[in-house]
């Protein structure tokens, strides 16, 4: 990922400049690296709820890891 920005930056800078002038084709090409999961966003939620869900997911993952390591230790 770090190299992606370095390689694409000069081209994206030119595309952004042309898009800012109103060129429709350049506007369609303009992009921002936001991650692969951005397409899964379909609702707006409060940040508090997003963080709570992340914490819940983390705790569930830790519990699963503990269960796996406990099972491995009993072999």
Image: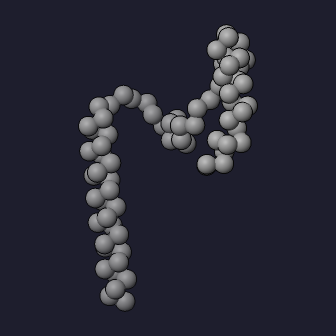
Give the side of residue 6 with respect to residue 57, left or right.
right
Q: Closer to the camera, 27 or 68?
A: 27
Residue 37 visible, this angle: yes
Q: Closer to the camera, 68 or 2?
A: 2
Q: Is residue 8 above or below residue 62?
A: above
Residue 65 at what x, y percent from top left? 35, 69
Looking at the image, what colour scheme do you see? one colour
Name the outermost residue toward the bottom.
Answer: 75
Q: At 66% from the left edge and 48% from the top edge, which residue is drawn?
A: 3
Q: At 37% from the left edge and 89% from the top edge, which residue is drawn?
A: 75
Name the outermost residue toward the top.
Answer: 22
Residue 10 at what x, y percent from top left? 72, 33
Place residue 43 in its image quadrant.
Answer: top left
Give the side of residue 17 with respect to residue 55, left or right.
right
Place residue 30 in its image quadrant.
Answer: top right
Residue 61 at what x, y percent from top left? 34, 61
Q: Closer to the camera, 67 or 18?
A: 18
Residue 29 visible, this angle: no
Place residue 72 in its image quadrant.
Answer: bottom left
Give the side of residue 13 with respect to residue 59, left or right.
right
Q: How many marks?
A: 0
Q: At 71% from the left edge and 17% from the top edge, which residue is drawn?
A: 18
Residue 11 at what x, y percent from top left? 73, 31
């Amino acid at each position: 990922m770090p190299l992606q920005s370095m390689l694409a930056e000069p081209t994206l800078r030119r595309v952004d400049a042309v898009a800012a002038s109103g060129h429709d084709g350049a506007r369609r090409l303009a992009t921002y690296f936001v991650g692969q999961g951005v397409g899964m966003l379909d609702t707006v939620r409060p940040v508090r709820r997003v963080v709570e869900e992340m914490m819940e997911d983390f705790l569930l993952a830790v519990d699963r890891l503990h269960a796996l390591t406990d099972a491995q230790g009993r072999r």
